[in-house]
Image (spheres, helix red, strand yellow):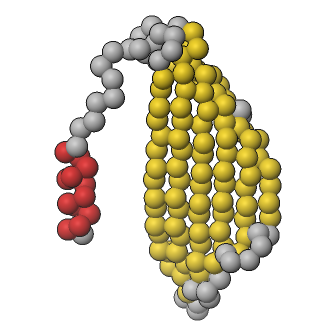
Amino acid sequence: MKYCIAVLLILSSVCVSGQDEKPYGTGNIIFGGSFSAERHKIESTNATSTFKVQHSERSYLGDLNIGIFAYDNIVVGVRLDYVLRRYKYDTGFISNYNHFLIEPFGRYYTPIGLFGEGSYGIGISETGEFGSDPLDDRKVNNW
């Protein structure tokens, strides 16, 4: 608990400033992304408490995007998305879910800084038992 509080205090005290102006002119570059990680441990029982099921879940999600102002107020670019989820049950069974997506996008900035964005992504999604061939591979399209 002390570790979590210390991390939260450190993160809340760090201030990052990306840009002070609105560089919406031709040739400027935008760059961004995010990363998150989650871990859960879940214990379930039925109404009569005759059995108990335990499992844990780990999730790692990330995206990276880069674009360039092709014209004033108009950005074209590409985004990469990645998701890894792993479920481990008390029986020792481990299943995973992997998802990778490449998305070209277009973005229009209004004079006050708000923007609208459209994208189309293509990629692959895998689901299966960890350490063996995936049980299910799918091609993914995303609007």
Rendered location of residue 99, percent (x, y):
66, 54
Rendered location of residue 112, percent (x, y):
41, 11
Q: How many marks?
A: 0
Asked if residue 53 can be seen in this view, the reply is no
Asked if residue 92 can be seen in this view, the reply is yes
Rendered location of residue 35, percent (x, y):
46, 50
The residue under the point 28% across, 36% down is: 16
| Relative to 12, 125 lies left or right | right
The residue under the point 71% across, 32% down is: 120
Where on the picture, by quarter, is residue 55? bottom right
Q: Quadrant of the C terminus?
A: top right
| Relative to 103, 21 lies left or right | left
| Relative to 29, 127 lies left or right | right
Rendered location of residue 115, percent (x, y):
51, 19
The residue under the point 66% across, 63% down is: 97
Q: Is residue 96 above or below residue 12?
A: below
